Image (cartoon, rainbow, N blue to C red):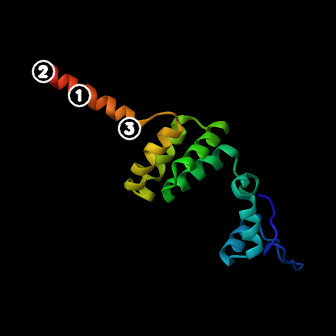
Amino acid sequence: MRALSGCNERPTSEGTAAMAKHEDALRCMALGDERYVKDVLAMQLTNVDASGLDPKTHALVRLGALIALDASQSSFQWNASTALASGATVDEIVGVLIAVAQTVGLARVASAAPAVALALGYDIDAALEAHDEGERIISAERR
């Protein structure tokens, strides 16, 4: 985890163990330290190093957050591309939808699924239309 400026710049007294990086980061976030938050925001989408996660895990975690936020199609498109480029599989990306379903609710997952699918090159709307058309043809043939 990369050190950021802000509340993590504090003196340590002899006999006091230095605060672990994760403890310091959590303390800064909880305090809403302006310099720390500014540094994190300045990193924008490239905060992989600061997170301490590998790029694939980072992209999958971000995808979970986007699902929870009911993000836009373009956000899912960018994040899915990043996840795939970082070594994630299509099954792992779909697995994130499954993993967060109980936490964020089925409505969020159902809302995100078509956007994630489209980001992966699968047009659910077109597939459903084709399925409906096939059902109509089969139904008409049975008459």
Quadrant for residue 28, please give it.
bottom right
Task: Choose the circle earlier in sequence order: 3 or 2.
Answer: 3
Quadrant location of the C terminus?
Answer: top left
For the point 60% across and 46% down, which residue is it?
Answer: 79
Are discs 1 and 2 less than 8 Å apart at CB? no
Q: CA distance from mark 3 to mark 2?
A: 26 Å
Give the residue number, with chain letter if any, for mark 3.
125
Q: CA distance from mark 3 to mark 1?
A: 15 Å
Give the residue number, with chain letter if any, for mark 2.
142
Q: Residues within 10 Å of mark 2 (few under 14, many from 20)?
A: few
On the rendered structure, is 47 left or right of 83? right
Q: Secondary structure at mark 1?
A: helix
Residue type, numbered disc 1: Glu
Quadrant location of the N terminus?
Answer: bottom right
Q: Say which of 51 and 79 sits in front.
A: 79
The residue furthest right is 14
**Which x, y percent locates residue 11?**
87, 78
Task: Choose the circle earlier in sequence order: 3 or 1.
Answer: 3
Q: CA distance from mark 1 to mark 2?
A: 11 Å
Q: Residues within 10 Å of mark 1 (few under 14, many from 20)?
A: few
The residue furthest left is 143
**Which x, y percent locates residue 132?**
27, 32
Task: Determine which of the numbered discs, if any, sits on residue 119 in the image.
Answer: none
Residue type, numbered disc 2: Arg
Residue type, numbered disc 3: Asp
Give the residue number, with chain letter if any, for mark 1.
135
Q: Secondary structure at mark 3?
A: helix
Q: Secondary structure at mark 2?
A: helix
Residue 24 in sight in this render: no
